[in-house]
Amino acid sequence: MGAVAKKSEIAQGTTKRVEVDGQSVLLCNVDGDFYAIEDVCTHDGGALDQGELMGDRIMCPRHGAFFDVRSGDALTLPAIEPVQTFKVRVEGEDIFVDLN
């Protein structure tokens, strides 16, 4: 699988939604480190890419649930299930995501 994004496309403190093998993935830049999570809130299935990234937490825009983008853990109600996380590899400017 080729690169899904460039580092320069995702400024610190922002996110970018990408498709990886038909899976919606949200790339998150936390202080220059990149994390990848499934772009679906486990509470109601809404997309997280419209939510606000605050440090290492993303807030679902629909009901305000917070998730840790590093671990996928649900941090606040109404979400109780974690979001799936994926391994990220950075080579130069290129960002790769491994779904396995």
Image (cartoon, rainbow, N blue to C red):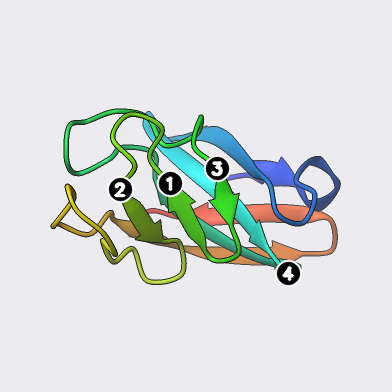
Instruction: Give percent across and percent down for residue 79.
Output: 18, 50
- The amino acid on which the numbered mark 2 sits, given as a three-letter code, is Ala
Which of pointers 4 and 3 indicates the residue nearer the eye?
3
Q: Residues within 10 Å of mark 1 (few under 14, many from 20)?
A: many
Judging depth in this view, the residue of 39 and 64 nearest the camera is 64
**Cα gap from disc 4 to disc 3, whole angstroms:** 15 Å
Which mark is drawn over residue 65?
2
Residue at horizontal 37%, vertical 53%?
99
Residues under labels 2 and 4: Cα distance? 22 Å
How many numbered discs?
Answer: 4
Identity, as a three-letter code, of the amino acid under mark 1: Met
Spatial separation of the CA atoms under disc 1 and disc 3: 5 Å
| Mark nearer the viewer, 1 or 4 | 1
Q: Secondary structure at mark 4?
A: loop
Under mark 3, the amino acid is Glu
Q: Tell me if label 2 and label 4 are in contact, CB under 8 Å.
A: no
The answer to the question of whether label 1 and label 3 lie on touching residues, with beta carbons closer than 8 A, is yes
Q: Position of residue 49 (x, y in %)?
A: 50, 34
Vertical comparison of 73 with 17: above or below: below
Q: Earlier in the sequence, mark 2 or mark 1?
A: 1
Tell me if mark 4 has few (under 14), some (14-19) or many (20+) residues whose alpha carbon lies within 10 angstroms of its own: few
Q: Are marks 4 and 3 in contact (CB under 8 Å)?
A: no
17 with respect to 41 (left or right)? right
Sequence-first tag of 3 and 2: 3
Disc 1 on helix, strand or loop? strand
Measured in 3D between alpha carbons, the distance from the residue under mark 1 to the one under mark 4, in whole angstroms, is 17 Å
Name the residue beneath numbered marker 3.
52
- Decide: is 5 above or below 56: above
Instruction: Name the residue beneath numbered marker 4.
Output: 31
